Amino acid sequence: MSARMLPSTRFALISIIALGCGSYKGELKSFDPDRGEVLHIPIQDSTDVNAKVLLPAQVGDKVTLRFNKDLRLGKKPRYRIHAIQAERQIHFAYIYLDGSKLSLTRIDSLRDIIIAQLEQGVRFDTLAARYNMDGNKTGELGWVKEDNYIEEFTTAGRHRRKGEVFKVDEPSMRWYHVVKKLDDDRTVPIYILWKL
């Protein structure tokens, strides 16, 4: 995950759990001192594993969710829906150039080369593997809550069209990027659940 993401401050964040860890894609698991375990589950579309349970549910309903890890252990965790919020999400790929290691002249030159290669039909992930300086070999972060990016990313990308390539600078952090907007922005429901 990129260093350009900002941490959540709504609850004391314990962990971000990915599908590969035996949980649910996009789930945020946190702890509220008054409520205990709190889940934040986005439903991306009707094919999500818990969509059939959550989409028809309302605030206050009790639900049993399906998680790969819990199913293997024979558990059926129960939650109460505390809130349903709309979350605006964005989907970018980026190539990061480190201003602490490269001069601004070199960064501008590289960005011009990268954009020219994109215009010639070279795939973005190919260029990310070659040029990205933070270890992300595809440059993609997946769908991310809009305000989890630094402000310069969201401001620069907010009114861009799908497929558009642009530059984003954060000089105070010495971060310089070539960014591609992979999809139009979307709004998804986020279910905030308290474990029973």
Image (cartoon, grey):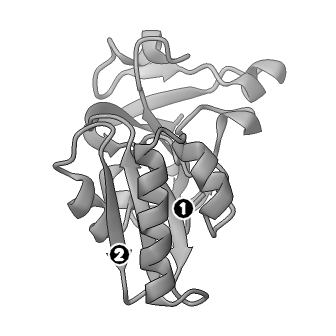
User: Can residue 92 be seen by looking at this rendering?
Assistant: no
Image coordinates for residue 106, horizontal then vertical, percent: 51, 82
Label 2 Cα crowd, 10 Å radius (few <14 / some 14-19 / many 20+): some
Q: Which residue sits at x=65%, y=41%?
A: 18
Q: Which quarter of the image is occupied by the C terminus? A: top right
Image coordinates for residue 22, horizontal then vertical, percent: 74, 32
Numbered badge on residue 169: 2
Front-most of residues 13 and 141: 141
Q: Which residue sits at x=46%, y=75%?
A: 109
Front-most of residues 24 and 95: 95
Q: CA distance from mark 1 to mark 2?
A: 28 Å
As drawn, 76 above or below 90: above
Q: Which quarter of the image is occupied by the N terminus? A: bottom right
Mark 1 lies on residue: 13
Q: Quadrant of residue 6?
A: bottom left
What's the amino acid at mark 2? Asp
* Residue furthest out toward the right: 73
What's the amino acid at mark 1? Leu
Image coordinates for residue 101, horizontal then vertical, percent: 61, 88
SS at badge 1:
strand
Judge left or right: residue 51 versus residue 140.
Answer: left
Front-most of residues 195 and 12: 12
